[in-house]
Image (cartoon, rainbow, N blue to C red):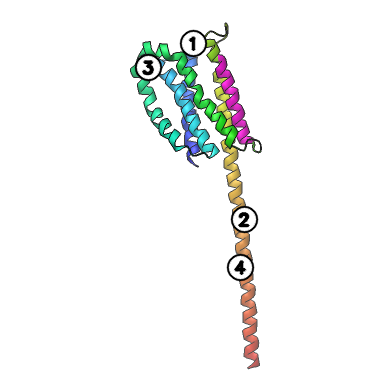
Amino acid sequence: TESVYGWFGGFLVVSAAWALRNFHESLTFPHIPSRVWETLVLGGLGLSRLMLLMFVLRYSGQQMPRLERWVRPALVLLLPLLYLAGESVLSLIRVPYYTACAGPMWLSIYLLARHSPWRREAGPALVLGALVGSELLAIHDWLVAVNLLPYGTQLWQNYGLGLVVGAMTLALAQRYFAAFATARSLNQQLEQGIARKTAELDANYRQMAAYEKAVALAD
């Protein structure tokens, strides 16, 4: 459906805003209260994952109304709830929250692998590969966050974000141009059919005119 483009746009905007958090060391931002900043960092990740899930549902053509009844309110309420929770609560739930954010990504991967023609079409294969690669990078960041990796930074997932956005863009472009090619082919078939019917009607008219002329001469 056309809404797939809307969810892609929402994912792109939220993900780009979320990724800005990693430029705080090289860019100077206006002062942002730490509570607001923490809300944006945690909420941005959750929103981008939920929007990605909605994109995948539309892209793979799946209808899951029960799931969507939970996702849509979550998109609206997530940021206010995180802000109301306060910094102390956010610091306590940071790691469990990051772990929970893996759920929408894993479900998106499952839906694409199960319901999209990724074995036959390049677009779904690109998106699926990008999601898997991005999640592997996210797992690395999670391992660093919980101190299971004694080295490294929690910035690898940003590279995965670029992969996902690029793959989604190419997949949507491929689908758009495929739809355009199909429409053009159908239009050509329609024009050919109209021309054929017009020629048949013209031939029938000529035959009828010749018959009427012959009858008139016979009389």
Tell me, for residue 198, which label it has, or none: 4
93 vs 129: above or below:
above
Query: Does 198 sit above or below residue 15?
Result: below
Whether residue 33 is visible to the viewer of this picture, yes or no, is no
Residue 75 location, x and y as percent?
Answer: 41, 28
* Disc 3 and disc 2 in contact, CB within 8 angstroms: no
Relative depth, front residue between 78 and 69: 69
Q: Quadrant of residue 195?
A: bottom right
Instruction: Name the residue: 47% across, 30% down.
Output: 51
Q: Amino acid at mark 4?
A: Thr
Image depth: mark 3 or mark 1 in front: 3
**Which secondary structure class fits the magenta region best?**
helix
Res 125 visible: yes
Mark 1 — residue?
Answer: 25
Q: Marks 3 and 4, how far apart in space?
A: 69 Å
| Up-down relation of residue 210 to residue 62 (above or below) | below
- The mark found on residue 36 in the picture is 3
